[in-house]
Amino acid sequence: MIDLIRRFLKYVEITTKITSLFAFAMTLSYLFFIGQPIDTLRTAVFFLGMFLFDLTTTAISNYIDTKTNHQQLQFKRSIALLIIYVLFVLSTACGLYLFYLTDVVVLVVGVLCFAFGVLYTYGPIPISRQPLGEIFSGFFYGFAIPFLVLYINMPEGHFLTFAVSRDALDLRLQIWPFVSLILLSIPPFCTTANIMLANNICDLEKDITVKRYTLPYYLGKRSLYVFAALYYLAFLSVVVMVVTGILSPLCLLSLVVLIPVQKNIMVFFKKQDKMETFPVAIKNYLLIMGTVSISIFLSGLFPI
């Protein structure tokens, strides 16, 4: 039984789920900071559906990749495919139940997230093989998760109102709350996108041989400057949120990790290797998202 669980966790690459978990945790910290009560049922259903679907997309990716990379799956292909179906059905059930508890906006965003997750590695031209893979992964992990967590917990109409009639479709955005959401999403967006960017930079030569033309193929050495700039943008967004009053001045504490993040950037600039230097992208993600999440939470405990 233990071996079965171990193989399953390896199949779904459980250690890679930090991108969804940290974005979720950061948003919960923000709700705590602004004093917004959390709807336990909605939030729990969302988390379960999000987590299960994250496992689903990874399983799909591994199932498809092993057709061409000659690596062996942890299960027979029939069992591996069955696991994908089960995970997909369970995550879909969570999504539909959340729609039942909320409204059509959650359904629309959820369908888009599901479509992206499947098309990321499946289809005639998977998103992961295109130059916009970093942007898509950053958007859905960095923006969609915070948006949905906030949307299902905030008062109705806080972000937007959506109404459909026989003659018209009425969509109204609340500008400042939406701007605040975008700024809050920048750290998870940038750090998530950089994990994929670093991975694609390291795999550039191998990807070219299999006709996989990712963003580094088009940018060349400029990819490294984009890699660094995304981290600086994440820090800048924290400063902007503090200046505009979205976050507490306590959140400036997250800037203390700028020095180790910069050191990791220089390590990656010197050498781009999957085994040796790619992990710095993971380290920077943990440093930035960890300190941002903790500082927001502390701001709720010690209001200034």
Image: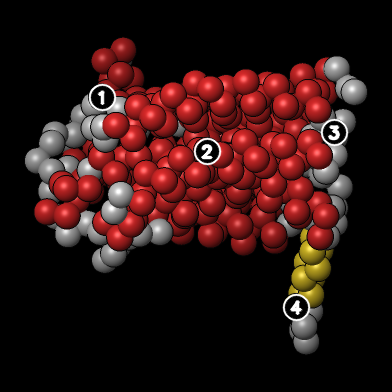
Residue displayed at 38% across by 30% down: 266
- Residue most extreme to the bottom: 167
**Helix, strand or loop at disc 3?**
loop
Q: Amino acid at mark 3?
A: Ile
Q: Relative to residue 61, is residue 209 depicted above or below?
A: below
Quadrant occupied by the N terminus:
top left
Image-based side of 190 in relation to 222, left or right: right
Q: Which residue is mark 2?
A: 231
Q: Which residue is mark 4?
A: 169
N-terminal of the pair, mark 3 or mark 1, is 3
- Residue most extreme to the left: 70
N-terminal of the pair, mark 4 or mark 2, is 4
Residue 96, x across and y down, in percent: 60, 51
Q: Quadrant of residue 87?
A: top left
Can residue 91 be seen?
Answer: no
N-terminal of the pair, mark 3 or mark 4, is 3
CB atoms of marks 3 and 4 within 8 Å: no
Q: Relative to residue 104, is residue 1 depicted above or below?
A: above
- Residue most extreme to the right: 304
Q: Tell me if mark 4 has few (under 14), some (14-19) or many (20+) residues whose alpha carbon lies within 10 angstroms of its own.
A: few
Q: Which mark is residue 276?
A: 1
Image-based side of 169 in relation to 207, left or right: right
CB atoms of marks 4 and 1 within 8 Å: no
